[in-house]
Image: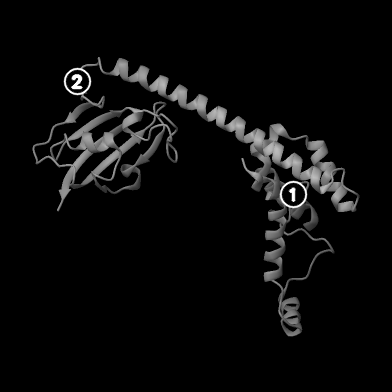
Amino acid sequence: MNSALRFAAPLVLASLVLSLSACKPENKEDTAKTEADAPAATGEDAPIIPGIAGLETEKKQVSYMIGQDMGKSLSVIKDELDLEVLTQAIADQFAGKDSKLTAEQALKVQETFTAKLQAKQAAEAEAKAAKGKEEGAAFLAANKAKPGVKVTESGLQYSIVRAGNGPMPTATDVVRVHYKGTLLDGTVFDSSYDRGQPAEFGLAQVIPGWSEGVALMPVGSKYTFWIPSELGYGEAGGGPIPPNAMLTFEVELMEIVK
């Protein structure tokens, strides 16, 4: 959460105003032509989209659209908001009433609230990272005892799904592979199978667990790798991968790219 959320709603309105301005005819001839070409309105406030229950006028439809966008923007902090007071503040602004907060007070509230949310998110991230490391370690401890699972000196675990008989890549090679990566809960975070085409990677450019694991594979092989977080994305995580996440990869080594 950052202070940008404070301005989410005004940005929605600004975007709407700009889009409306861009649609305005530039001169009277254009205006006349536009009005002549437009279908006749069925009323002063005819709906843009007829037949929507509860939104029978243009004003209601536009109001609902803007309110919906504001709601989406603010949903991440909905538990921190009093909807009645939020609505009152909007009504006060529309009515031109004096604000209950001075500019200085508003800034103080914003800064204090932002700092509170940042501290809360940091604590949640730390707890999630600790949980991820604990759960990953427990899984690997049990997994290494399963039949067919091998463990390297670094802690990488793997099993041979299909043995190939081609050459083995070195740490400086580029390889073409099909693969699927999943989190401990089974969530697929990346898959060349889903994209319908294999991928090419330089083994010097990927996470250590990948570099080490694929270098063990003869071309034509399919392996499963269980990669400890320290051989993956570590405490930082990345994109859909949480901090300290243990990763599972199914990898088919198709060829070494020359």
Q: Residue at x 28, y 45 (%)?
A: 205
Q: Residues within 10 Å of mark 1 (few under 14, many from 20)?
A: some
- Please tell me which residue lies in front, 195 or 19: 19
Q: CA distance from mark 2 to mark 1?
A: 59 Å
- Residue 196 in percent (x, y) is at 31, 48
- Residue 74 in percent (x, y) is at 68, 42
Q: Residue at x 46, y 27 (%)?
A: 129
Q: Residue at x 38, y 22 (%)?
A: 136
Upstream in sequence: badge 2 or badge 1: 1
- Please tell me which residue lies in front, 4 or 47: 4
Q: Relative to 197, is 183 above or below?
A: above
- Please tell me which residue lies in front, 211 or 76: 211
Inspect the image, locate mark 1, and give the three-letter code of the amino acid beneath it: Tyr
Q: Label 2: state its secondary structure.
A: loop
How many numbered markers are drawn?
Answer: 2
Q: Identify the colour scheme used.
A: one colour
Q: Is residue 247 in view?
A: no
Side (left or right) of 87 relative to 203: right
Task: From the image, tell me which residue sits under label 2.
Answer: 148
Task: From the image, tell me which residue sits under label 1.
Answer: 64
Q: Relative to 124, is 97 above or below?
A: below
- Residue 56 in percent (x, y) is at 79, 52
Side (left or right) of 83 relative to 211: right
Side (left or right) of 105 relative to 20: right
- Residue 98 in percent (x, y) is at 90, 49
